Structures are given as C-alpha cells and as structure tokens.
Amino acid sequence: RRMTARTAARAALLAGCCAAAACRYRAGGSLPEDIRTVGVTLLRNQTRVPGLEGEITRAVISALNSGGRLQVVDADGEPDLVVFGDVESYVKGAVRTDRYGDAAAFGVVITARVSARRPGGEYLFKDAKVTNRSTDPDSGAVDLGKGQSERLGRTQAVRDLGRNVASRILEQG
C-alpha cells in the first residue's frame, strides 16, 4: 500500500509536534541553565484588597517550588534571579445574572506587573503584565447557584496567577 502525499504530510507534522513537545519538556523552558536560585520579594499591592500581595507572593513561591527547576531562596541573599513587582488590579464582575438581575456567576481577574532581574542588573523581563487568565480564561469564575463563593474565585485566581508568573519566569519572558 502506498503512502499518499497527504498522509506523509500528516505523519511529518505529527512527528514534528511530538519532537517539539518532547524537546520542550526536557529543556524545562528557556531559562538559562546558570540560573538555579530565585528570590521572590513581596509584591506591592496597588489594589484596595487587603492582604492580596501576600497571597500572590506565596502562590508564586509555591508554583516555583513545585516546578523543581529552581530553588527559592531569600531575596536578600544572593539569588541568581530576583522577582519583584506590583499587584495592579483586582476586578470582580458579574458573568451571568439571574432573572431578578442579581449576580448568579461572576469572575475574578487579578493583574500583576512583574520583573525578573539578575544581580548584575540585567533583566530577563521587565514590567511583564500577567493575569490569572493568561492561560485559562475560566480562572476565577464561580457559580453562585452551585454554592460557590467569591472566596473560592479569589483562591483560584491567586493560585493561577502564581502559576502564570512562575511560567513566565521559566519561559524567560
């Protein structure tokens, strides 16, 4: 049985995608190999939500620790990379209303601007805008009809923002 040109093209495309995915997995992102430690400073809170900066900073540290590629150390020490920035906004908005006009579902979107700098002053990236919805458009969405609360949406949004900041670091911008 002969392979048609279309079948050969599909096989080549599939093989290329698999090879790229495998290579990306082994490489662990494009972060330079000499960066092994990272210090994360407390993000500055520019919102009116008390304590949000601490929650997000802890989420970033947790996401970096779970990745296994970097060791999180004290930012005041001598890390290979220092991460800092601002929590710019916390927006909660109705996604769906009930027949009375009350919110039945809403979403939380948190935006931060982060930078990653080496000790010599060289930036890997500067003032990068990252949100909890950078990779998942449903992050922070809750359905009040199912008994979910704003707190759940906030928790999900904080966790996802931490993961997205960690991804940005590992992908170097």
Image: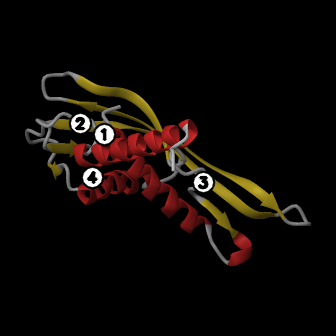
Q: Residues within 10 Å of mark 4 (few under 14, many from 20)?
A: many
Q: Residue at x 14, y 37 (%)?
A: 33
Q: Residue furthest left?
A: 78
Circles 2 and 4 in contact, beta carbons < 8 Å: no
Q: Which residue is mark 4?
A: 64
Circles 1 and 2 in contact, beta carbons < 8 Å: yes
Q: Residue at x 33, y 51 (%)?
A: 60
Q: Which residue is mark 2?
A: 31
Q: Residues within 10 Å of mark 2 (few under 14, many from 20)?
A: some
Cα separation, mark 1 vs mark 2, equals: 7 Å
Query: Closest to the observer: 79 or 92?
Result: 79
Label 3, secondary structure: give it: strand
Closer to us: mark 3 or mark 2? 2
Of the image marks 1 and 3, the number of the one nearer the N terminus = 3
Label 1, secondary structure: give it: helix
Q: Residue at x 46, y 54 (%)?
A: 160
Cα separation, mark 3 vs mark 2, equals: 30 Å
Query: Closest to the observer: 116 or 167?
Result: 167
Residue 145 in the image, given as x and y percentages of width and height: 74, 74
The kind of residue tagged 3 is: Val
Can you tell which mark lies on residue 169? 1
Can you tell which mark lies on residue 108? 3
Of the image marks 3 and 2, the number of the one nearer the N terminus = 2
Query: Closest to the observer: 18 or 62?
Result: 18
The kind of residue tagged 2 is: Leu
